[in-house]
């Protein structure tokens, strides 16, 4: 072997044969074998394959041997690949869990997928082998599929199977994940595997998996990783599945809105739910006993902002009316000075351009007279105007919202305040409550 390393040129294949196992564990020797495979083709591949049948399982996980294993997979024929995969099948699970072995198994998956396409395109039904490399591979990995899904190396093998192999060979992943969806979805790697499952075309196994996720959606949405799975269901699944998730949280909206992870799901639910369910959501969010907590909460205030953005005009009016006593009341005076409070006020001003932020008594009105225009989705138009003549141009500019700084800047002089405020208060007493919100 030492003479092989000392040679200035690559030794001929006949000198390498008989030392394949030792050479495959060494960086220089492994490169010599790979060069022989590149230069001498199929003949060298067959000879090296046959010599290594007793130790290819070891080579798969070796820091250097795994490169030789991947190279010989590429060079041998489809029939020889079946022999090699069958030979290493007892070690495929352990190899998938290994830093170096996972690359070897992923290469097996890729070449199995190529063989399946070529077989489907060219071979006649009678010419099909009794057992393909894909069948051997999936049969070997299926018992440990759930474990592979949550492993830092194994999950890449599972994702490669979902991406490359046809459904007939990948359905075992769906079944394994569905049976352990609670554990897999709450894992940092498992949640990624489930998202790849949901990206696949519709099938019976995929539908079963979605059904199991929906059943556990309330539990999963409160988890650091499970919430991403529920959000993905809301993004890519059917309307029936989305509706089932959205309905499952009715009655628990305010509790979920103040949790770090489920608050993200609640924002998505507000966007995707039906009008009837959104009405129930807004009714819960407008609860006078919980609205202040939601406004002050570092997560709940984002749910309030989303609700203001997606609700109809009437729903937004109801929500702002519920918030009005807390924006400037003595007990809630600090809300307007918090980051969340400023963001909420900014959302209100965006939805209702003529929103006037009142004084500390909490008096603040949003006109909704006959000329108040709405957009198609119920949002207030930026072109709405007061034309009843009572407030005039001065009151329209009473407070200007400086969005960049997140605060309101008073623009009136004392004389303007004295002139405008009595007329404003008198007007507020005369109008009907259902025409104004604050």
Image: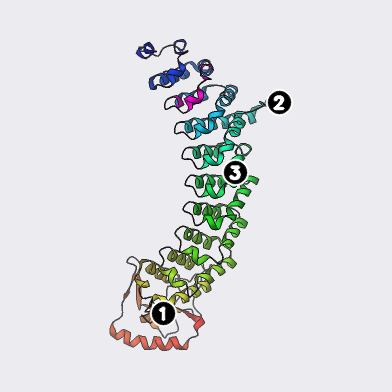
- Quadrant containing the C terminus is bottom left
Disc 1: CA contacts within 10 A as few (<14), some (14-19) or many (>=20): many
Rendered position, 343 above or below 12: below
Give me the C-alpha separation between circle 1 and circle 3.
Answer: 55 Å
Part of the protein shown in magenta:
50-66
Q: Earlier in the sequence, mark 2 or mark 3?
A: 2
* Residue 430 disc label: none
Rendered position, 242 above or below 153: below
Q: Judge left or right: residue 241 versus residue 383.
A: right
Q: Earlier in the sequence, mark 2 or mark 1?
A: 2
Residue 347 horizontal/vertical position (percent): 42, 68
- Quadrant containing the N terminus is top left
* Residue 174 disc label: 3
User: Nearest the camera: 409 or 151?
Assistant: 151
Q: Judge left or right: residue 249 versus residue 400.
A: right
Residue 121 horizontal/vertical position (percent): 64, 30
Residue farthest to the left, as pictured: 414
Q: Residue at x 49, y 83 (%)?
A: 433
Residue 170 horizontal/vertical position (percent): 60, 39
Which residue lies under the disc numbered 1?
364
Give me the C-alpha separation between circle 2 and circle 1.
Answer: 81 Å
Secondary element at tag 3: helix
Q: Is residue 130 visible?
A: yes
Which residue lies under the disc numbered 2?
126
Q: Is residue 378 visible?
A: no
Residue 112 painted magenta: no
């Amino acid at each position: 072997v030492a003479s092989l390393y000392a040679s200035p040129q690559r030794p001929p294949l006949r000198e390498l044969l008989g030392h394949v196992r030792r050479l495959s564990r060494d960086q220089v020797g492994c490169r010599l074998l790979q060069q022989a495979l590149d230069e001498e083709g199929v003949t060298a591949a067959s000879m090296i394959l046959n010599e290594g049948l007793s130790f290819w399982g070891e080579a798969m996980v070796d820091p250097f041997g795994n490169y030789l294993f991947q190279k010989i997979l590429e060079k041998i024929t489809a029939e020889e690949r079946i022999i090699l995969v069958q030979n290493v099948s007892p070690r495929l699970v352990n190899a998938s869990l290994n830093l170096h072995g996972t690359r070897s198994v992923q290469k097996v998956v890729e070449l199995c997928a190529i063989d399946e396409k070529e077989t489907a395109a060219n071979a006649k039904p009678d010419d099909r082998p009794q057992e393909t490399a894909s069948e051997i591979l999936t049969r070997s990995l299926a018992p440990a599929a759930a474990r592979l899904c949550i492993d830092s190396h194994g999950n890449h093998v599972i994702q490669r199977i979902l991406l490359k192999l046809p459904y007939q060979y990948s359905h075992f992943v769906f079944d394994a994940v569905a049976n352990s969806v609670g554990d897999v979805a709450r894992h940092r790697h498992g949640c990624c595997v489930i998202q790849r499952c949901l990206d696949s075309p519709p099938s019976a196994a995929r539908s079963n998996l979605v059904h199991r996720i929906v059943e556990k959606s309330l539990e999963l949405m409160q988890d650091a990783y499970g919430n991403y799975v529920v959000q993905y269901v809301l993004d890519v699944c059917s309307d029936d599945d989305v509706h089932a998730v959205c309905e499952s949280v009715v009655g628990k909206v305010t509790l979920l809105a103040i949790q770090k992870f489920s608050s993200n799901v609640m924002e998505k639910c507000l966007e995707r739910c039906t009008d009837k369910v959104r009405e129930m959501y807004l009714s819960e969010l407008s609860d006078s006993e919980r609205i202040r907590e939601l406004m002050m909460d570092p997560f709940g205030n984002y749910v309030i902002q989303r609700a203001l953005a997606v609700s109809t005009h009437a729903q937004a009016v109801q929500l702002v009316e519920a918030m009005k006593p807390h924006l400037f009341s003595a007990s809630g005076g600090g809300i307007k000075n918090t980051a969340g409070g400023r963001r909420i006020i900014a959302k209100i001003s965006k939805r209702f351009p003529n929103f006037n932020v009142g004084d500390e008594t909490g008096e603040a009105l949003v006109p909704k007279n006959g000329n108040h225009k709405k957009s198609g989705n119920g949002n207030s138009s930026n072109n709405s105007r007061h034309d009843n003549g009572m407030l005039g141009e001065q009151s329209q500019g009473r407070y200007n919202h400086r969005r960049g700084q997140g605060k309101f800047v008073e623009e009136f002089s004392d004389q303007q305040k004295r002139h405008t405020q009595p007329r404003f208060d008198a007007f507020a007493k005369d109008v009907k409550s259902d025409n104004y919100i604050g």
